[in-house]
Image: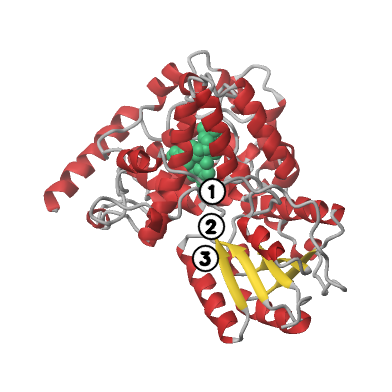
Amino acid sequence: MSETAPVIMWFRRDFRLADNPALAAALKGGGPVICLVIRDARIDALGAAPAFRYEAAVAKFAETLEALGQKLILRSGPSREVLLDLARETGAGAVHWNRLYDGLSREIDEDVKSSLKASGITAESHGGHLLFEPWSVQTGSGGFYRVYSPFWRAVKDLEVAPAIAAPAAIAAPEAFPASEALADWALGAAMNRGAEVLAPHMCVGEEAAAARLDAFIAAKADGYKARRDYPAEPATSGLSENLAYGEIAPHRIWRAGQRAQASGAKGAEHFLKELVWREFAYHLIYHTPHIETESWRPEWASFPWRDDSPQVLAWKQGRTGVPFVDAAMRQLYVSGTMHNRARMIVASYLTKHMGVHWRVGQKWFEECLIDWDPASNAMGWQWVAGSGPDAAPYFRVFNPQTQQEKFDADGAYVRRWLAEASRNPGQEALAFFEAVPRSWGLSPGQPYPAKPVVDLARGRARALEAYEQHKQQQ
Ligand code: FAD
């Protein structure tokens, strides 16, 4: 292989220059680099909002590369074929990428790696998506962790990878290979009317993510533990959106959190703990990939959840008649995100009060969240449903009314997102009606449900009864 053979840097969910181990490895030889994104089965499987957000991440990163005299090459097709073809076409001798850990990604990546190697091309995967590779954290007996607290204790004092500065230059090939146009991928097509409503809520790119982190550390880390559960307050970092597309490395967040902790920020340790929940989710999806598709605890496979119900549409539309649930579901549709406490409450209402399978909710979140993450979403749903590892027990049913009294006592969150809760609804609450499909036939003037579609006390009693019966049958 000649010394000037290009190297392919395959970007997937790592749209950043700094703290990018695969990019650093691609640059090591000093030769030209071909920066590539592939629209493969993983991209085609994305829900409407994540696909739209992914498109924005790619567009922004293409601009960043252009400013360096580089170009982001876009190709569609099965990753193996695209990479082999591009390597043949350009004479590239090596491909680098940062690992992903969900079942589909591992299947694709293993196939890619062995095919490239069989063709004499160096194929190297790197750890850039997580602080701790899932196989590197082991219990005393050499297994994986099923419970969060000991996982936290096992990782909290570990060293994480040192910072990698953003490269000042990335050598370009003599001629850039042909690229498809991002617009032709039409990744935002499924958003329909929602795109314009959602776009202002997004915070896209490496620079924006770094600024978000700095602002959080400066103003909110101290009060994080005390305020993080109040959905009306901007007390959390919002970084899940950027982590989902790798616009910031968890390492950078970890280091910033540790510095804040060392300088006495009271909430900093709790913030680090939350970041480790993300690690735990990936630990689980790596060791037990079925967490994405099946109840993690086998005894829950036969639980009589319904797969659908007419009430599910009311849940999706934020018209259950339970204001906290409905405000949260509207926030999801309008902003592509939802406060963590609200996620737990709507998930509990769906799986317990309504008795609907957690997979139905998981799928809807996958369609609507701009921070959609296969590991955290699956773990979150199974945690609430009671079927997951280290889950909330099934008999702990969130009461949305008392939750509102506790965490949204003045109703600010509910009024912000639920137009019907306010005499003069604000722009964000009204935006919901601009975003929803016309076929839903919703308008702000419509009367709000006079009572909940599932009565809180009755729904709770029914859920507990189903649980008792199921337990006896085991
Ligand atoms: P912060 O409070 O600022 O926390 C910092 C970071 O820690 C977050 O960015 C996130 O990476 C991580 N984190 C915090 N809480 C959790 C948690 N409970 N589980 C895993 N990681 C966490 N998170 C996603 O990123 N994508 C999802 O698709 C997703 N789906 C969820 C579904 C359900 C049913 C539930 C209950 C939770 C889900 N979460 C998901 C976790 C959590 O709600 C979000 O990570 C959090 O709300 C993001 O807001 P933030 O960035 O301001 O978090």
In this rendered view, identify the residue nearer to me: 223 or 19: 19
Foreground disc of the pair 1, 3? 1
Q: Residue at x 41, y 38 (%)?
A: 157
Res 127 label: 2
Q: Nearer the viewer, residue 210 or 401?
A: 210
Spot occupied by residue 130 in the image (x, y as percentages of width and height):
51, 50
Q: Which residue is mark 3?
A: 105
- Please identify the quarter of the rendering in which residue 456 is found: top left
Q: Within 8 Å of ligand 1, the CB of disc 3?
A: no
Badge 1 residue CB within 8 Å of ligand 1: no
List the single residue furthest toward the bottom: 119
- Is the residue marked by circle 1 packed among few (<14), some (14-19), or many (20+) residues within 10 Å? some
Do the residues bearing badges 2 and 1 touch, measured as CB atoms within 8 Å? yes
- With respect to residue 457, does 412 lie above or below? above
Classify residue 218 as left or right of residue 474.
right
The circle on residue 161 is 1
Q: CA distance from mark 3 to mark 2?
A: 14 Å
